[in-house]
Image (cartoon, grey):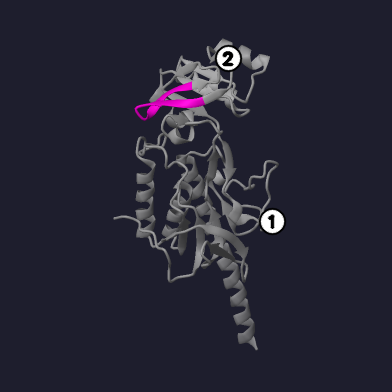
Amino acid sequence: MTGAFNDRTDRTSYDVIVIGGGAGGLNAALVLARARRSVAVIDSGEPRNAPSAHMHSFLSRDGVPPLSVLETGRAEIARYGAVLVRGQADQVEAGEPGGYVVRLAGGATLDARHVVLASGLRDELPDIPGLRALWGEGVIFCPYCHGYEVRDQPLVVLGVHPASAGQALLLRQWSHDVVYVPHTQPLTEEERERMDARGVRVADGPVSGVLTREGRLHAVELADGRTLECAAVFVFPKMTPNDAAFEGLGCARDEAGWLVTDRAGRTSRPGLWAVGNVVDSRAQAVTAAGMGAAAAFALNHDLVDEEIEQAVTAHRASAVTAAR
């Protein structure tokens, strides 16, 4: 059984709309659908980890292609009645009474009592020739995701981010042959000392390109012509959350501009939730899935509380009417 996307749905009103069909969004939808909530998942079908052939550090799914995991997840939520909508959620707006309207690219709208944003983030790579083409296969970011597969092999870390030096030091856990290239991120004297103490070599000079051989990563080329052969290039991308759909709703943000949530995923605005990479750049698929589940548990309890309050209000009104 597979979870098929719908380009349109006859139903337009739901208890919950989930924006984003990655691990976080699908797990939230799974919990909510099993709680007998009406749920729609809006997804563009372009997950962050699509360039990777395999995902890791996910119990029972270690080494499985990420797109296969998502296909399984879609089938699971569909089994409980959740609707999968292929599309892009452009904007979330306040609706009546107290709910929200989700506007899709193309003009369609869906209504929901609560909205979960699970739309992930964008990895923006430095403009180095050959880098983007190898992203996910040879050019990677996360040691915990892919470090084991390149263990004990020569690794190059590109210095393009304030955290790049720490990334190089961390990678010594996986390989004895790590080279740091301070491309746009020069080292302080203290950092050089730490590199030397840790056994990380430094190759000074900017990078001119990433070289391939027979379609696979071969080496990093420096501006002076030197080449550093390697099994993987680690680069710290600029990460930008895909949270434009919540713009204009007044949700609190931190100093870096990221949405602020409580431990359950609630934003500062009632009825709006956010989970996974859209609020936590460190979240792997397994942690994003956990965040989605935690939000779904709390969200369902909030819905139950709302329904109890509505029932009590109606009960009291009925009692007053009967007493007249």
Residue at the image position 51 percent from the left and 67 percent from the top: 108
Q: Name the residue at the left extreme.
A: 1
Residue marked by disc 2: 195
Answer whether residue 194 is magenta in the image: no
- Marks 2 and 1 sit apart, C-alpha to C-alpha, by 44 Å
Answer whether residue 215 is magenta in the image: yes
Where's the N terminus, which quadrant?
A: bottom left
Figure check: 211 above or below 284: above
Magenta range: 209-220
Q: Name the residue at the right extreme.
A: 255
Q: Amino acid at mark 2?
A: Met
Residue marked by disc 1: 250
Q: Quadrant of residue 298?
A: bottom right
x, y percent for residue 32: 46, 57
Q: Amino acid at mark 1?
A: Gly
Mark 2 Cα shell of 10 Å, populated few (<14), some (14-19), many (≥20): many
Q: Which mark is residue 123?
A: none
x, y percent for residue 274: 57, 51
Element type where label 2 sits in the image: helix
Where's the C terminus, which quadrant?
A: bottom right
Mark 1 Cα shell of 10 Å, populated few (<14), some (14-19), many (≥20): few
